[in-house]
Image (tube, grey):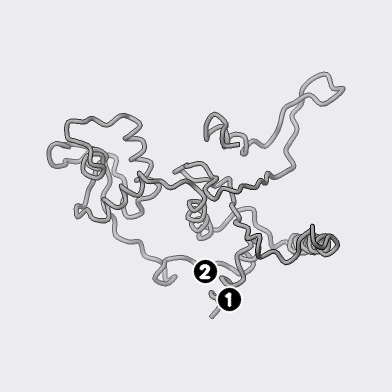
Amino acid sequence: MFWIKSIEDIKSFLSRQKETYKAPYEVHPKDHKRQCVFAGTSNTLDFLPLDRTGNRRFLPVQVQAEAAEVHILEDEAASRAYIGQMWAEVMEVYRKGDVKLKLSPAMERYLKEHQRSFMPEDTLATRILNFLDGYGGKMVCSLQIYHEGLGHPAYEEPKQYDIRDINSIMKNYAAGWKAFENPRHFPSPYNRQKGWERVAPPDNGGHGKSGFQPLPEGEAVQLGLPEEWLEAGKP
């Protein structure tokens, strides 16, 4: 599916809530609301497109085949009973009403990091973040990152797509930096530029050193997190 013309085409296809087509024996096309979800498998770990704005339409689940409790080719009856039990548990959760279609902010942050594990390595982002880690200034601009962070010579002007890539990485990956809209003065040769300023770490609101909020056990179970994670989080 990722050989479609662009990532935007994939997003549009998955986000569409209806299909317009002419069913057999009908005269005119009609809108038909979708009543499905899409699931797929891949033998490639980095199967998600490299989308720095996020792959929130995808919920990747890594399966360990060697950990399977039953195998349909070895014991069909046990396998079908296992699947039936799974659907029964899903229905029980649904009937209790403890179902959320929207993730909590804490889980959104976790999912965003989890999704990056299934995207191709973003080598450009790694180079820029490594530069920022060793950079001592309080402000930085895209031209400065292009020349000092990525090693391009001073006489080389960045292309528009170079600036777009830098801006996208700073917006989505550089957690310790905040963009400012009005141009500020930078040392020569950068002069007046828009850019980013270093920000102090945010107050974590009393949620421990990590800053993450505790995840309710019901939501963790619904998301299928491993049992050892749930046990580790208990007091």
Q: Is residue 209 left or right of residue 9?
A: left
Q: Position of residue 8 (x, y in %)?
A: 53, 33
Q: Is residue 120 above or below residue 31?
A: below
Please name whichever residue, 147 or 53, is drawn nearer the observer in this view of the structure: 147
Within 10 angstroms of label 2, few (less than 14), some, or many (20 or more) residues? Answer: few
Q: Residue furthest left?
A: 188
**Image marks 1 and 2: residues in contact by CB distance under 8 Å:** no
Q: Picture quarter containing residue 28?
A: top right
Question: The N terminus lies in which quarter of the figure?
Answer: top right
Residue shown at 50% from the left, 60% from the top: 106
**Residue 194 in sight here:** no
Q: Is residue 12 left or right of residue 158?
A: right
**Residue 160 in sight here:** yes
Q: Is residue 10 above or below residue 89?
A: above
Secondary structure type for disc 2:
loop
Residue shown at 55% from the left, 45% from the top: 47
Q: Picture quarter containing residue 218?
A: bottom right
N-term-proximal mark, 1 vs 2:
2
Q: Is residue 96 above or below residue 39?
A: below
Within 10 angstroms of label 1, few (less than 14), some, or many (20 or more) residues? Answer: few
Please name whichever residue, 73 or 106, is drawn nearer the observer in this view of the structure: 73
Q: Which residue is mark 1?
A: 231
Please name whichever residue, 192 or 127, is drawn nearer the observer in this view of the structure: 127
Q: Position of residue 51 (x, y in %)?
A: 47, 42
Whole-angstrom CA distance, mark 1 to mark 2, is 13 Å
Q: Which residue is mark 2?
A: 214
Q: Amino acid at mark 1?
A: Glu
